[in-house]
Image (cartoon, rainbow, N blue to C red):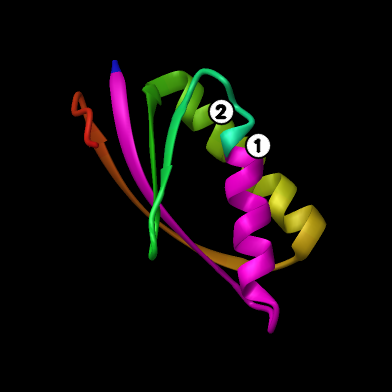
């Protein structure tokens, strides 16, 4: 099943732009996902299990590398946006 996820990251740091860019770069390293960064959020498209695995790994990575952040997501099943 395909899932489209719209995700926004709000790091609790002064240098938030750099942390968001790091998160997007790490997300783009997943070859099996389509990643479309935008001005306020990033759209991720892929097989459900792959997307969920990537998000799980990246949330843990983000917390361990940068500390606390707020993530806002929207999930749309069986829809390929963009």
> Please, is residue 48 above or below residue 56 in the view?
above
- Residue at position x 72%, y 57% in the image: 63
Residue 34 shown left or right of residue 76 in the figure: right
Residue 53 marker? 2
- Residue at position x 59%, y 26% in the image: 30
Residue 39 shown left or right of residue 71 in the figure: left
- Residue at position x 70%, y 46% in the image: 60
Residue extending farthest to the bottom is 14
Magenta-colored span? 2-27
> Please, is residue 17 above or below residue 23 in the view?
below
Quarter holding the N terminus?
Answer: top left
Crowd class of label 2 (few under 14; some 14 to 19; many from 20; radius 10 Å): few
Residue 25 vs residue 50, the one in the foreground = 25
The residue to which callout 1 is attached is 57
Could you tell me which secondary element the residue under label 2 belongs to?
helix
> Please, is residue 57 above or below residue 33 in the view?
below
Tell me the quarter of the picture where residue 12 sits.
bottom right
The location of residue 70, given as percent across then percent down, is 53, 67
């Amino acid at each position: 099943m395909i899932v489209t996820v719209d995700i926004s990251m709000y790091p609790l740091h002064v240098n938030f732009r750099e942390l968001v860019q790091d998160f997007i770069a790490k997300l783009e390293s997943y070859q099996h996902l389509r990643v479309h960064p935008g001005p306020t959020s990033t759209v991720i498209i892929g097989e459900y299990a792959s997307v969920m695995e990537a998000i799980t790994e990246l949330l843990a990575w983000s917390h361990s590398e940068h500390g606390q952040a707020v993530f806002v997501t929207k999930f749309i099943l069986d829809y390929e946006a963009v």
